Image (cartoon, grey):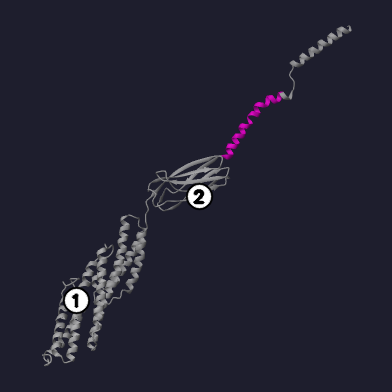
Amino acid sequence: MNRRELLATGMLLAVAGCTESADEPTDDPSNETDQSEPDDSEEPEDTNESTESDTAIEIASIDAPDTVGQTELFDVSVTVSSNEPGDVAVTLVDANDETVDEASTEITGEGEETVTVSLSVGDSVPAEESTIRVIADNGSESAESSTSITITSLEADWEAPFEEAKASINAFLDDLTSAGSEADDRTILDTTISDSYDGLEGSGYISDAEGESRDAYNEAKPDSDTRARMDRLRDEVSLLEGLRVCQRETCAVFEKLEAELEGFRNGDSLSGEVDEQYNIALDEVDNLSTLVEETEPVIGDDYGTKIDQIEGELEIVDRMINALTAIFSARNNFEAELYGTAFDRAQSARRDFERAVDDIDDEATYPPEDSVDETFRDHAAEWENEASEIENGASGRQTETDN
């Protein structure tokens, strides 16, 4: 084969080789990369799912009381699951969707945990079904849940101090009545002007009742019938103080009468202390009368009748005061041998003392109408006897000067 043929044959072989090479597949790495692209495209989806799992937050439960009273403080516990730290906000809203109270706390983001906050209910919150709303937020996601809670009316604790005040008032009344009687059914009318009563122990009972009735008033719900009743209770305690002082000063009048009689028999001059004490007692009964008129009692009774009793006693004392002036004058005139004047003064005194005895002995004169103050009556009778003795002694020994 000549040179030209060889060259032609070589060129044909070269072309044939190139053609064969193009038709046959090769192990080009770039082809493998292209074939694996579908697998690489799925990887971002796996990454997104992992992110959602990491940032998810869920409220598992809300633990709160079913009911809570006005003015009460209560706890709300929330169980939250989160893989990131965040906050839990708890809000109490009323039936009108108005916020009553709210509080928040942090979560660690370390899985499931329970956090607790405290909420309070005001006394003006409507007593009806309300809602506790919870929002948990970790910055990436948030969750919300709620539960119902019923607000109940304020149940004021006025009964305990009321019962204490009632006991103190009854103790005072018992102390007052025991000065005049030991009977089981005794009343304040059993203690009269002739009894010994200083009111010292009663003052302590009233002091206790003042504080207890004030507590009962403060515990009662404003603008309620109970609050009005507790206000009346406080007025009654004030009335008791007026009664205590009035009874003490009235009994002191009788003590002055007894002291005056002893002084008379000892030859002493008229002291005037009965008149002075009578005026003190008269002022106190006027004060007590005003208190009774302004008070609607809650515990005690017979207050108005008690005033009638004391006024009746003091009216008799008023008559006796005039008789005291007359009998002291009669004695002095008799000793001065002015028998005519002594007779007249003694007779006047004797008549006044006699009327006093009759009035005290009359069950209808002043309360109580079914009994008589025998000590008071007997005392007036002693004065009557003293006056009668001077009257009888002077009647047959009048001098020419007297005529």
Q: Is residue 243 visible?
A: yes
Note whether 50 is above or below 401 in the view shown.
above
The residue at the point 20 percent across, 81 percent down is 379
The residue at the point 17 percent across, 76 percent down is 360
User: Could you say which quadrant of the image residue 178 lies in?
Assistant: bottom left
Left or right? Give the position of 376 relative to 144. left
Left or right? Give the position of 177 relative to 61. left
Say which amino acid is labelled 1. Answer: Ile
Residue 328 in picture, x, y percent from top left: 20, 85
Predominant secondary structure, magenta span:
helix
User: Is 41 in the magenta?
Assistant: yes
Instruction: Please tell me which of labels 2 and 1 falls first in the chain.
Output: 2
User: Could you say which quadrant of the image residue 342 lies in?
Assistant: bottom left
Residue highlighted by disc 2: 116
- Which of the two residues, 16 or 396, is positioned nearer the viewer here? 396
Note whether 389 is above or below 113 in the view shown.
below
Left or right? Give the position of 227 relative to 403. right
Label 2 secondary element: strand
Mark 2, other Cα within 10 Å: few <14 / some 14–19 / many ≥20? some
Check whether the beta carbons of the residues at disc 2 and disc 1 lie within 8 A of each other: no
Say which amino acid is labelled 2. Answer: Thr
Mark 1, other Cα within 10 Å: few <14 / some 14–19 / many ≥20? some
Magenta stretch: give its range: 31-55
Give the CA separation, mark 2 to mark 1: 76 Å
Residue highlighted by disc 1: 316
Q: Quadrant of the C terminus?
A: bottom left
Q: Is residue 186 visible?
A: no
Residue 174 in picture, x, y percent from top left: 29, 70
User: Could you say which quadrant of the image residue 241 lies in?
Assistant: bottom left
